[in-house]
């Protein structure tokens, strides 16, 4: 409990920064390629990211078995030094499964858990249900909990008034909002600031979100352009708004390709194009091909052609 | 394979009829109450239903562990006689997990599997992804596959043109559509009739769906009013349309309470009110209380007060 | 007032049947072609339709000026004999304008007015606003009022509980629902039957809607296939369900082309293909061309190739 | 034409700033109260707004007759000095009516017209239809055209790629986007900057939108808090981001009350509470009452209680 209260009082500081929600590489048989995972993580931590997130949406967590997920955490824990945050996605549709997943992840050494809203019974997920769900998880989790809202993927919205209520729990330290709705981000900052950290999950609104008080981002595009994301955040901190805006505009086409437009299959193509290990997604996700893959590769090259510093792997 | 081709050639006949997608009872500790499950199944099979479905949405399958789900199938298999269909929900977001779940269910003796669309990466679930997903499952499943479409719950629509393509697979024998969209039901019947059985998943459109060619229904309200549902289907078969329509109108308020309005928590309250074992749902689903529960109880009593024959448990 | 009470008491009978919501033809200058309008109406009334609707969505009423609309009514009144119903769309976003439009139409001799929900301030159009709006119109209209609900076009839903309340007004005699949601049609019939006539506005659900108690339809496809629509309704009245269903299946592709798929531009191409005067729509609607127009023409030809009786104009 | 090319070349400069889309006051009989309109405009132009917009959504333009609208413009033209912009909403669902409305407004002396997307045939409003519509209006309008996008009200989205194409027209000088989607605002600025002015229509995203390059806003809340909106814009121009953000947070609850939460009825209550002439809306809009009106009044008082300078009317 000493650890928890320390973490809580320093929550905003601890969670601030840019985090890539890293992908899970698969080999030709469709199994998790743990060697490739290690290589990618090694490269991620050579960049100025504050930590990494495993088993998020981009990590294809909904397509992994429980034991595969546990092994991903183990490998990541070995590869991520203690001065960087290791966060694991542990959301489950059932409250009791979500608690168990958080406990298992904590036992494997993660620093915090990122818990998406349940989605199976979306029409029943009113404020009362969501508050009871997260309170129970926060009570049961040995490590701090970060709420995760992504309505386009779950059909559920974690409204600011619900988050404001959950912010009272000492073990809930942050919220990641991926809706791309800066009014909602602003309301989260306005009503919860000082009580929990607000992280943006949409790189297309990174600059705007940092302006209105988000303290960082968990961003798919940070899996390929971590330096740029970190630089944008540094520009905002330094009051260099014109530089931040110019970089945001350059990031827009690439960020769109690897999220709203082509999702994880697009992200993996972009990773391959940028020198990381992308590889195939796991079915039912299909490998992107043809003109769509070409569009992603072009957006990736266009982006790095204009970067003042080389691609991290050049 | 002999069994498969027999089933396939007679698919429409075999799957026709009314099926309750039965609930999973939980005890005070939140564990599955297998004794209650057995009691409920015993009563279900004393009614004129064609079989039962376990581990569907109403069975809170997304909230059960894999081992709990397996045990539910085992218990059901012991309780359901061989002349009734036992169907298990085995949909998973990952294709390989869905194949494994179908195999495990087949090993435990189910007659067919009901496979909902994946929902985690809905924006990527285009026709190509869905066809590859279901073809792989149908290839891998030892028992016939019934497609399951429920857009309000998954954010994905299994459009008639996709189903028409999947109907070419000899191991895909039916489709359950719960969207309540009779134009889509009509298109399914028009384009797939004779190749697969079309089952409706919305009791509010039961009569209309049977009129336009559906061969049966998998209906939450059949968990409490199986005789009425079966009688409505028999009326349609006998050309007694006025009787069918009158019964449909009487079913409407109850059917709404246990689906679109209050979901599984509403269904469990109605079961308790009608003499079945409902009990609490599993969190994050909350037990229905107060005026809402009262409304469900009233709708249940109103319905049975007007039934020409007593409640099955009276 | 004597007329009103007579109409009201016989409402269901008077409004029953099939109505084409006729199009407004335009000449090469984009002006209303009243001669073509007269020709089309002459043909419409040579078919077994119960009447015609002018100035509906298919009539491009939102694209006409008030004086053009008045002239359309005048021309129609001259062309429609007194033993057929002439109904005019008079919905407006403002309550006072809607009352004036109803009065003007009544002065020009229409038998009833069809009043779509207001749509400009949809988020404010709650039950109270809609009830006050329609009550005021029904008070002010010298002729009976038919409510018109089409959520896909207006963003507003006229829920059955609102309609049930409005059915108390003696001058509200019917409701047209174009949502294609047969559960809603069923609820309308269940709660309002005997008090107002329920008309379906979606030909894709015509058979199902008649089964569940609708007394007729106002259907775009009736602008090209009035005999078939009327025959389908007659089949249902005669209890010839198999014949009705077969005809419904044949109508589905054509009905889709001229509504949800290609709208008014599709309908006008189909009219041209079937020997009526379609012509161009008014901008911003664009004339359908290329493969899309070809698809509509093919659907039209396919439909008439299988008709047991010739196209009305052959 | 000389005027047009001058305006075009200086478009960004001319349209920058804060504009209230002023309301239309009605008297007890429901007629436009032109005296109250004059009083309100007199007060608006005593504040640091760049101009005013009449006949927008907040002006209840869809509920006015053509002649009422013309008279509103006349009154406004008399009251607004030539060094402030007078912009009139002239969007219509038909292209030819929209051209005529723009010509009439120009004849009455407006500086520019604001043209919302057509909404009646939303499913047909693809890029081609929207481009042809706006090109024709821009060709026909004697004064510069500002595009207006508000998907929640119209069901149509004017996507950045469409706007980028329309920006080629010399008489299209700006776009107002009210969707509250800062990714879309950013794309508009990125792809159209220097060619047309981007104005935000959602005060809840005012600060974020100015950060990413919008040059001003047409904001309901500017009808009651014009000084604060102008001050926020000045803070951003001066690089005083912390001050801008603090003011944005204070504006959030009030801005929400008068837009997404309670719309025009909420705005009119807030105007009454702040010393302007609000009065009743025109039916079907209902006057806000009870607890809802109280909530709006409280939000208004809370806002002004914390203003460093007095309410403009104090």
Image: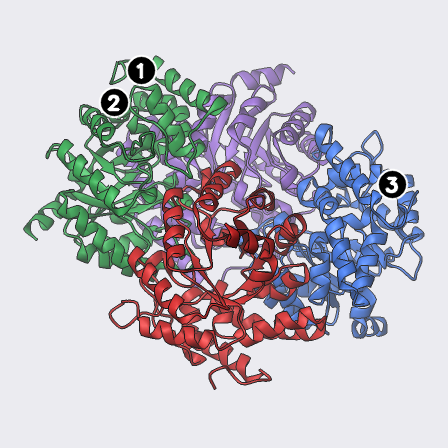
Chain colours: A green, B red, C blue, D purple
Q: Is residue A188 visible?
A: yes
Residue A307: give its label.
Answer: 1
The image shows residue C154 at horizontal and vertical percentages of 62, 50
Q: Name the mark nearer the viewer: 1 or 3.
A: 3
Mark 3 on the same chain as mark 2 = no
Dot 3: few (<14), some (14–19), or many (≥20) neighbours within 10 Å? many
Question: In the picture provided, is B236 more to the left or to the right than D301?
Answer: right
Q: Residues within 10 Å of mark 1 (few under 14, many from 20)?
A: some
Asked whether the residues under the numbered discs 2 and 1 touch, taking CB atoms below 8 Å apart as contact, a structural biologist would say yes
Q: Is residue D277 visible?
A: no
Rendered image quadrant of residue A84: top left
Q: CA distance from mark 1 to mark 3?
A: 62 Å
SS type, badge 3: loop
D297 lies left or right of D112: left
Question: The disc numbered 3 marks a residue on which chain?
Answer: C
Disc 2 from disc 1: Cα separation: 10 Å
SS under mark 1: loop
Chain of the residue on which disc 1 is drawn: A
Q: Nearer the viewer, residue B6 or B93?
A: B6
Q: Which mark is residue A227?
A: 2
Residue receiving disc 3: C276
Check the image and report above or below for C227 versus D89: below
């Amino acid at each position: 409990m000493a650890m928890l209260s320390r973490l809580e009082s320093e929550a905003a500081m601890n969670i601030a920064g840019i985090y890539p929600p890293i992908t899970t590489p698969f080999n030709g048989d469709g199994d998790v390629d743990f060697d490739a995972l290690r290589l990618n993580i090694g490269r991620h931590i050579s960049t100025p990211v504050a930590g990494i997130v495993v088993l998020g949406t981009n990590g294809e967590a909904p397509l992994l078995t429980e034991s595969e997920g546990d092994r991903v955490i183990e490998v990541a824990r070995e590869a991520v030094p203690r001065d960087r945050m290791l966060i694991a996605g542990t959301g489950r549709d059932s409250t009791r499964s979500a608690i168990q997943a958080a406990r298992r992840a904590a036992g494997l050494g993660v620093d915090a858990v990122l818990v998406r809203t349940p989605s199976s019974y979306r029409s029943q997920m009113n404020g009362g249900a969501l508050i009871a769900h997260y309170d129970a998880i926060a009570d049961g989790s040995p490590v701090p909990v970060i709420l995760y809202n992504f309505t386009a993927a779950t059909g559920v919205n974690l409204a600011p008034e619900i988050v404001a209520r959950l912010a009272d729990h000492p073990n809930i330290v942050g919220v990641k909002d991926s809706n791309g709705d800066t009014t909602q981000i602003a309301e989260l900052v306005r009503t919860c600031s000082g009580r929990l950290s607000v992280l943006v999950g949409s790189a297309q609104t990174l600059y705007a979100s940092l302006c209105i008080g988000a303290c960082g981002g968990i961003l798919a595009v940070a899996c390929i352009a971590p330096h740029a994301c970190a630089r944008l955040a540094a520009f905002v901190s330094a009051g260099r708004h014109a530089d931040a805006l110019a970089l945001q505009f350059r990031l827009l086409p690439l960020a769109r390709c690897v999220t709203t437009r082509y999702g994880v299959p697009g992200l993996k193509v972009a990773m391959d194009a940028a020198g990381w290990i992308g590889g195939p997604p796991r079915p039912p996700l299909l490998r992107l091909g043809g003109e769509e893959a070409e569009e992603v590769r072009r957006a990736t090259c266009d982006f790095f052609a204009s970067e003042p510093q080389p691609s991290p792997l050049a």
